[in-house]
Image: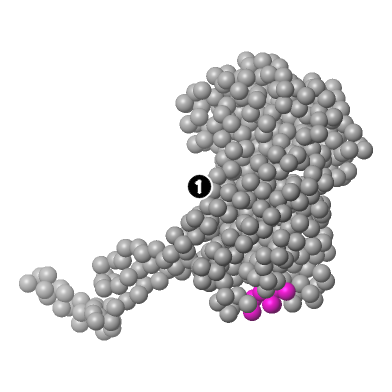
């Protein structure tokens, strides 16, 4: 799509939105039901595309992509009438007799820009919330996951008229053209560098944004933790999708007393979950492209590697890798890893942990493995992060009952369930004043009113 075609598409959607066609909740529900049926229809095709782009197995594709999208659809279908209803609030006595209420209203034409690491789910889940809130939408899949992008285009074109929901394929040129247009809301998931550019371009039109970014999410393991279970859940969260998960544990921050025991348990779990030859495991995925493959290899220090490290350029695979004796000054700690490399750092006191984490950019997620109530309270209260888990990883985003989003450098805004509906809605505050009573005290001339009141109270 060229610049003029994109401009025409945005104008077409704005014209359609202004007809009020997206406002009836019954029609939004109908659109969500149609989308759900279409995803189920093409489920095998979606999984094949994810296999081609990222090497994901069918089970992982369902667990992390189609299953989560279908869950969000089911939740929104169930609750949409409740979410879209006007909410009456208390009215001050001075405004008697009135009704005060908040009315959820769609922003209008929204842009959804999705990444390549979870290319189906991170395009479709925000779309579900945007449609439920009554918006039109332009979806821009990542050029790095072309097979999944084509399936997304096929599904959307089958479900929607282009003036309601459209897909724009392409790469950087199309992104630039889209960001030059005036949207009413922009929802972006991706890197911090691109997120800054999105926000910069949105500011030209004073367009509100949600940015779902990333960062170096710490995984703290203290000496009271169940080490065997911690290792099992850390390995799951870290190496899922070959570490290409925005909320993956970026590094382990471990109490010195249990570090060796934890590393031994992590090694054991890697073998158990991925076999002794992960590169031959048909359920183990691959790095998205050669650029990221080389970037990740550049972060591995062979002198500190205690497990894994093997790789295959022909298949773009890197073994689950563990690095020991890592410090905050090592290259692997200077950027988000976004790959199957797990550095292990040590600490001596919880004060040290909290101070170090808070001295760095706010992470998207934080994980704590501990049996100490005091440690749980201190870390969750004093550390700044988007969201996370205690004694698990990843799963906090797998529910429509809680919003998911970043904080500070890891993003702004949130979505999922009611929070997602709210993200794509503007709440109008309205007072409906009755006409049969009109208190005179707010009108000029004020002096007569006040003199009368003073006379009454002083009499």
- Figure disc tally: 1
Q: Is 182 on the left-hand or right-hand side of 349?
A: right
Picture coordinates of residue 280, whole percent (x, y): 85, 29
Q: Main secondary structure of the magenta part?
A: helix
Queried whether the magenta region covers residue 193, the answer comes back as no
Q: Which residues are magenta?
A: 9-15
Q: Is 368 on the left-hand or right-hand side of 291?
A: left
Q: Which residue is mark 1?
A: 401
Q: Say if 290 sits above or below 76 in the image.
A: above
Q: Say if 1 sits above or below 236 in the image.
A: below
Q: Residue furthest right?
A: 314
Which picture quadrant has residue 350? top right
Q: Nearer the viewer, residue 456 or 298?
A: 298
Which color scheme does this rendered protein use? one colour
Q: Residue at x 54, y 63 (%)?
A: 29
**Can residue 220 be seen?**
yes
Q: Say if 400 sits above or below 12 in the image.
A: above
Which picture quadrant has residue 177? bottom right
């Amino acid at each position: 799509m060229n610049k003029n075609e994109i401009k025409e598409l945005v104008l077409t959607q704005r014209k359609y939105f202004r007809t009020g066609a997206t406002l009836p909740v019954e029609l939004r529900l109908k659109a969500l039901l149609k989308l759900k049926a279409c995803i189920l229809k093409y489920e095998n095709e979606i999984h094949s595309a994810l296999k081609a782009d990222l090497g994901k197995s069918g089970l992982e594709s369902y667990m992390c992509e189609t299953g989560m999208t279908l869950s969000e659809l089911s939740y929104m279908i169930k609750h949409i009438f409740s979410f879209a209803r006007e909410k009456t609030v208390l009215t001050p006595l001075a405004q008697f007799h009135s009704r005060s209420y908040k009315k959820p209203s769609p922003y209008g034409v929204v842009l959804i820009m999705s990444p390549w690491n979870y290319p189906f789910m991170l395009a479709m889940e925000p779309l579900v919330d945007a449609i439920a809130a009554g918006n039109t939408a332009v979806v821009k899949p990542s050029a790095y996951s072309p097979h999944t992008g084509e399936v997304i285009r096929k599904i959307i074109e089958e479900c929607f008229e282009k003036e309601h929901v459209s897909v724009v394929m392409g790469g950087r040129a199309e992104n630039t053209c889209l960001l030059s247009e005036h949207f009413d809301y922009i929802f972006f998931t991706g890197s911090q560098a691109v997120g800054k550019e999105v926000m910069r371009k949105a500011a030209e039109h004073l367009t509100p944004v949600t940015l779902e970014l990333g960062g170096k999410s710490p995984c703290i393991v203290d000496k009271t933790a169940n080490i065997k279970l911690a290792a099992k859940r850390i390995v799951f969260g870290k190496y899922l999708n070959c570490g290409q998960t925005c909320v993956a544990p970026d590094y382990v921050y471990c109490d010195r007393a249990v570090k060796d025991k934890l590393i031994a348990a992590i090694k054991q779990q890697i073998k158990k979950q991925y076999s002794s030859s992960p590169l031959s495991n048909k359920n183990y995925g691959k790095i998205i492209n050669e650029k990221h493959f080389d970037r990740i290899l550049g972060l591995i220090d062979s002198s500190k590697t205690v497990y894994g490290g093997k790789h295959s350029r022909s298949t773009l695979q890197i073994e689950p890798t563990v690095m020991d004796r890592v410090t905050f000054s090592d290259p692997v700690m200077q950027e988000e890893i976004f790959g199957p490399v797990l550095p292990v750092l040590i600490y001596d006191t919880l004060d040290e942990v909290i101070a170090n984490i808070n001295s760095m950019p706010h992470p998207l997620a934080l994980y704590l493995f501990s049996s100490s109530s005091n440690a749980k309270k201190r870390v969750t209260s004093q550390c700044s992060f988007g969201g996370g888990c205690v004694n698990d990883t990843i799963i906090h985003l797998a529910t429509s009952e809680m919003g998911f989003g970043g904080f500070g450098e890891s993003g702004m805004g949130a979505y999922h369930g009611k929070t997602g509906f709210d993200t794509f809605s503007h709440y109008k505050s309205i007072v409906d004043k009755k006409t049969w009573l009109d208190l005179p005290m707010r009108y000029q001339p004020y002096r007569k009113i006040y003199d009368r009141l003073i006379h009454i109270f002083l009499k």
